[in-house]
Every structure is written in C-alpha cells, then in structure tokens.
Amino acid sequence: MENMKQMLADTRKLSGQVAREYPEFIKGLVAFDDAAMKQGALPVKTKELIAIAVAVVKQCTYCIAFHVKAAIDAGATKDEIMEASFVACLLGGGPAWMYAKLVRKAIDDLNE
C-alpha cells in the first residue's frame, strides 16, 4: 500500500499537469472547492471532518489522504479524525470500515 504522503505528492504533480493543459476547468474546480471549504457557519476543521467521513463512505483513497492532511492542518486531532471515520462506518457498513482503516494510516503517514 502506497504511503499517503507520496500519494498526495503524486496527485499534486498530476493535478499541476492537468491545470496547465486545462486551466479553465481547474479554475472553476478550485473556485468551487474554495467556496465550499472556506470558513463560514461551519469552521474549516468541521468541514474537513465531514469531508473525511464522505471520503470513507465513497471509498476514495485519494480524498482520504487529501482531507486527513487538511484536517490536521486545520487543527483536528487524531481522535476527532478517527471519530469522523467511525460515523462514516455507521452509515456505510463494512465497506466503509475497510476505508476507515486508511484514515488511520493517513494520520501516521502525514504526521511523519
């Protein structure tokens, strides 16, 4: 299994390539992301914890890595991040649990 820190680096590199080739698409995507994830009625940390739970239910390893890193950067603790993934397991069942374990791996990999 790939190290989550390396996965993020590889994804950023590929995203940069796509951004150079399709700048208008990326510009719109970044604006949408910025609008959804900025501080508002919900703090950024809370939004990142929600994103982690959704990533677990949707079974997106890249999303897990990205949002665990963003949650850590927003001040989320290991326990807060893991509890968000446990809520996802409640709604997503066994398949979500398989991805919730990747959340724990991401915490370790991204805190190296």
Image (cartoon, grey):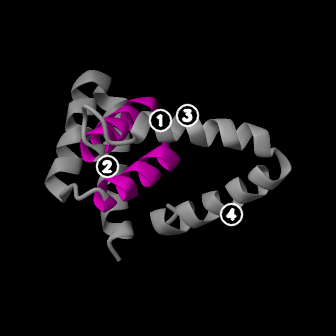
Question: Quick one: 31 or 72, which is closer to the camera?
Answer: 31
Mark 4 → mark 3, Cα distance in angstroms: 20 Å
Q: Which percent across, then down, holds residue 43?
A: 25, 41
Residue highlighted by disc 3: 32
Residue highlighted by disc 2: 101
Which amino acid type is shown beneath numbered disc 1? Ala
Labels 4, 1: front one: 1
Q: Do labels 3 and 1 touch, CB within 8 Å?
A: yes
Mark 2 → mark 4, Cα distance in angstroms: 26 Å
Tell me if residue 56 is in the magenta stretch.
yes
Residue highlighted by disc 1: 35
Q: Is residue 104 above or below residue 39?
A: below
Mark 1 → mark 2, Cα distance in angstroms: 29 Å
Labels 4, 3: front one: 3
Q: Which percent across, then down, holds residue 26?
A: 70, 43
Residue 54 placement: quadrant: top left
Labels 2, 4: front one: 4
Which amino acid type is shown beneath numbered disc 3? Phe
Q: Which percent across, then down, holds residue 7?
A: 55, 61
Mark 3 → mark 2, Cα distance in angstroms: 29 Å
In the picture, the disc for residue 13 is 4
Which amino acid type is shown beneath numbered disc 4? Lys
Question: At numbered mark 2, what does the secondary structure look like: helix, strand or loop?
Answer: helix
Q: Give me the residue at 30% from left, 45% from top.
A: 44
Q: Give me the residue at 68% from left, 42% from top.
A: 27
Question: Quick one: 33 or 88, which is closer to the camera?
Answer: 33
